Structure formats: structure tokens, C-alpha cells
Amino acid sequence: MKKETGGHPPIRRGLPMAEKRDAKALAAEAEALRRIEKRPSLLSRWRGYWHLSGPGWLQSAVTLGAGSAASSLFAGSAYGYRLLWVQPVSMFLGVIMFAAIGKQVLVTRERPFDVFRTRLHPTLAWFWVFNVLLASIVWQFPQYSLGTALLRDMFSVAGITLPALPAALIMLTAATLICNAYGSGRRRSIRLFEKTLKTLVMVMVAAFLGVVIKTGVRWDQLASGYFSFYIPGDVRGITIVLGALGAAVGVNMTFLYPYTLLARGWGRSHLGLKNFDLATSTFLPFVAATSLVIIAAANTLHPAGIEVKSAVDVAHILEPLIGITLSRIVFSFGIVSMCLTTLVLEMLIAGFVLSEVFGFEFSGKAFFWSTMTANIGIIGAFYAMPFWLPVLTSSFNLIMLPLAYLGFFLLQNRRDYLGEERNRGFTGLLWNTAMGIAIIVVTLGAVVKVLSLLELW
């Protein structure tokens, strides 16, 4: 489980939550994968992979939150279908990096925090985990703010006045119950956790799909929106594009993904499943959810020249156009699901970070209370987040996300780390080029995002 690296602390391998407690289940899964990979048709292999997928859903769940909702609504209301291409491109670049991160973890099974600390630099490792923990707390503020506002609005449809405190406690209780399943340390509970998140993501996609079906699709504009790669000519539009390109993947996701792979006990035999999981569980749900929100806003708000940033405002504006059920209940429930899934995953990330830093197991009471630290963000349900807080956090992320990407890029090319599995030859050149583009894009996106926040400040 441990490996000495020069004079550095030992590198830990794997996580005990999977390997010590469910060794038989892991062996059975590895055998099932071998049988799946021998199936003659690609479709039959995909069907087999679908039932074993999981960690990728967590990535789509954490990135589908208040920020994604707001940026998608604004893009659709301001530019119609023309910016549909932005979210797929941004997540594709993120998936490229996750594919590399996943390969490193599955081949070596070394914990990324230890790898950064020993193979790169201790300062980079500690700055990474500090940023991840800070982001997991700060980005809870908008989830609680938007989620409780929409819950209260949904109750008001039934003539019930729901104060902010009970609404916030509903969000907190639901997130805690879901997250606590992960803290049991049992692989079966982890699978249940992943399936719950998968269901919530599918529910939110279905909710937005209902709105789009009601409003219709401008098919002639759809293809152009995805493939024309339109970039607005004004400064604000360019800011939106670059900000969205750099914001689809957060620095906390670079920490969450490898640890969820280790928590499932995945190894080299899961390399094929990992790629399928990223494509179908991360890329497709994210693109579907954000595209449907953009289309709904483009169909209803853009023709009227209405530009909004609040999902609550959108629900009210949509009401006379598509009816109270779809606008104030279905649409709002989809946004609340986005907030809830992000709440749960930010809690899990905080638990992973503090467990690694303080050396306790990824289960039990210590893990539970470490996940609860993220819920400092419940303050967002009652008070507006001060301008300096997102500016400070985004400034740290501005530095850390490109550095994290660069760190994984360097590791992907190190012989003393990956050996023959490192990037090499023509295929390696393609991977390095794609990863390099991702690094440049997140750097530009983060800079634009911070500059826009500083402008507001």
C-alpha cells in the first residue's frame, strides 16, 4: 500500500474503503469486465459498461450547479442558439484531462495528493488541497442561495409561505442524507450513492427536456449553434465565452475524480470502462442539461429581448408562455436538482481533502464531520455572498487550476511515474496537444472570470 520515494514521505496506494472490505466484489467485477471486453459487438460492450459506470456521474453532478444554470440561461437569453457550442467544447477539454488523470490513477493506484507532494512539489500539493477545500465551501453559497429561493417559489405555487430557514434546512438535510451513504465505507453504499446522483442528474435533464418539448426546437438554428463556433464581437460576449470555456471544470473536480476512482477500487482492468464512463456519464449529461437550458431560454426569452441571470426570474417569465406547471414546478425542480447534486459533491470533496490532510479513514464520524465543513455555505441562503469572497477564491483558482492541469500533464509524460504507459509516439503527441490546449483555455477562462469579478468589485 505504501511506496518510498527518495527522502520523501511514502506514497499511499488505493483506499481501504474498497479493497479491505469488498475484495470479493472487486474480483467479481474484474472478471465481469474481462467477459464484457470479449463481447463481439461494440454495442453489447457498451451495455455491459453502462451497468458498471459511476464516478463519471459524480463529475457531471458537481459541475451542474448554480453557476452552470446561470451561465446557460444568460447565454440563451442574450444570444439564442448561437453559443450552444461553448459548453460541449469546454467539457470536452475537461474530459481530455480527466482521461489522463484517470489513466494515471488506474495504472499506478497512487493517491494524487501524495504524488503531487513527492513527485512534483510539496508546495503545489498543499496549495492544491487548500484551493479545493476553499472552493468546496465558497461554491456552496450560490447553491444554497438559488436552491432555497426556488424551493420557496415552488411552495408559493401551492399557496404556502416557506421561510428561508426551513427551505435551507430541507436542502441541508437532503444533501447530508445522500452524502452520508458514501461515509459508510461499504462499496455497496458507494454504488447506491452514485446511483442516487445518477437519478438526480437524469431527473434534471428530463425536467429541462419537458420545457424544451413544450416550447419547441428551432432545428435550423440548432446545428448552427453547435457547429458555427460563433464568437460575439463585443467585449461582454467574448467574456462570456472565455469564462464559460474556463469554468466547466473546477479545481475541486481535479481532486474529486481520482479519489472516486480509488474509492471504487478501480485499477488497470477498468481503463476501458473509465473512458466509457467519462463519455456517457460526464460529457453527455453535462452537454444535455446545459443545452436544454440554453434552448429553453433561447425559445422564450431571446425573441422578446429579455436578458436575465436569475432562475427564479426565468420561472416567472416562462409562466405565461408554457404554463404554471412546467415553469414554476418542473423547470424549478430541475434547477433545484442541479443545486442539490452540487451540494452533495462539494461535501464529499471536503471530506476527501480533510481525510487526506489529517490521515483518517474515508468513513465513520470523522469523515462525516469533515463533509459537513462545506456547509458553512448555508449562510448563502440568508445573506448575499460578499464580493471579495468569490474574487479571492477565483483568484486562487486562477493560479491553481492551470497548475493542477500542468502537474498532471507533466506526470503523464514521466517515465519514472508511468513507464511505458506515458505519452509517446504519434498518439502521445496528439494527447499532449489536446492537454496543452486545455491548459491554455482554462488559463484564459480563469483570467477573464477574475477580471470580470474585479470589475464588479
Image (cartoon, rainbow, N blue to C red):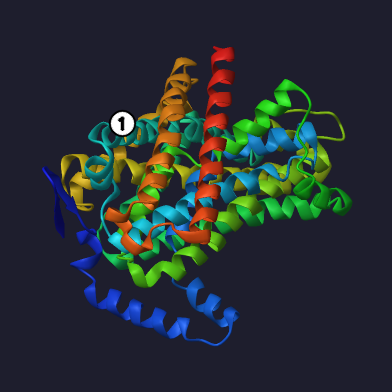
x and y, in percent, of residue 171 in the image: 45, 41
- Whether residue 329 is visible to the viewer of this picture, yes or no, is no
Q: Quadrant of residue 71?
A: top right
Q: Residue furthest front?
A: 425
Q: What is the tally of numbered marks visible in this picture?
A: 1
- Residue at 72 percent across and 21 percent down: it is 235
Q: Is residue 210 above or below residue 370?
A: below
Q: Residues within 10 Å of mark 1 (few under 14, many from 20)?
A: some
134 in relation to 100, above or below: above
Q: Is residue 337 left or right of residue 270?
A: right
SS at mark 1 in the image: helix
The picture quadrant where one finds residue 321 is top right
Q: Nearer the viewer, residue 183 or 33?
A: 33
Q: Amino acid at mark 1?
A: Phe
x, y percent for residue 192: 39, 64
Q: Is residue 226 at all visible to an observer of this figure? A: yes
In this orientation, which residue lies closer to the viewer: 336 or 20? 20
Q: Quadrant of residue 260?
A: bottom left
Residue at the extreme left: 7
Quarter of the image with the N terminus in it: bottom left
Q: Position of residue 336 (x, y in %)?
A: 55, 43
Residue shown at 52% from the left, 43% from the top: 436
Which residue is nearer to you in this view: 93 or 63? 93
Q: Residue at x 57, y 37 (%)?
A: 441
Quadrant of the snapshot with the C terminus: top right
* Depicted 28 relative to depicted 52: above or below: below
Q: Position of residue 353 (x, y in %)?
A: 28, 41
Residue at the image position 42 percent from the left and 40 percent from the top: 406
Give the residue number, with chain letter if any, for mark 1. Answer: 127
